Amino acid sequence: MSQDNLIKLQCTECKRINYFVNKNTKKLKERIELKKHCKFCKVHTLHKETK
């Protein structure tokens, strides 16, 4: 994975960073929000892009 397109996804419930994903910055300008599984909360929660 290239480092320039790598973003962090943070859980909205426990505020922990759980995922690192690639993002095409040419196509997607706004911050992404995905519903993913949090291993600390043990449920599917909304994860938002962080800096």
Image (cartoon, helix red, strand yellow):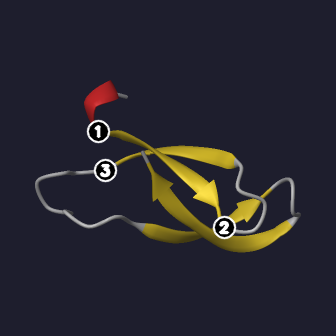
Tell me the quadrant of the picture where the C terminus can be found. top left
Question: Which image quadrant for residue 32?
Answer: bottom left
Q: At x 76% / y 59%, what residue is drawn? A: 38
Mark 2 nearby-residue class (10 Å; few <14, some 14–19, many ≥20): few
Closest to the camera, between mark 2 and mark 1, is 2
Mark 3 nearby-residue class (10 Å; few <14, some 14–19, many ≥20): some
Q: Residue tagged by mark 2?
A: 12
Q: Is residue 28 left or right of residue 11?
A: left
Nearer-N-terminus badge (1/3):
1
Which amino acid does the dot numbered 2 rest on? Thr
Instruction: From the top left corner, tell me how far across and down residue 15 is, in percent.
Output: 70, 56
Which amino acid does the dot numbered 3 rest on? Lys
Residue 2 seen = no
Which amino acid does the dot numbered 1 rest on? Asn
Q: Is residue 9 above or below residue 3?
A: below
Marks 1 & 3, CB-CB < 8 Å contact: yes
Tell me the quadrant of the picture where the N terminus can be found. top left
Closest to the camera, between mark 2 and mark 3, is 2
Q: For the residues marked 2 and 1, what is the alpha-carbon distance in whole angstroms?
A: 22 Å
| Label 3 element class | loop
Q: For the residues marked 1 and 3, what is the alpha-carbon distance in whole angstroms?
A: 5 Å
Instruction: From the top left corner, tell me how far across and down residue 33 is, in percent.
Output: 47, 70
| Label 1 element class | helix
| Number of on-image labels | 3
Q: For the residues marked 2 and 3, what is the alpha-carbon distance in whole angstroms?
A: 19 Å
Residue 21 tag number: none
Q: Is residue 41 left or right of residue 45?
A: right
Q: Residue tagged by mark 3?
A: 23
Instruction: From the top left corner, tell me how far across and down residue 6 is, in percent.
Output: 37, 37
Q: Residue tagged by mark 1?
A: 5
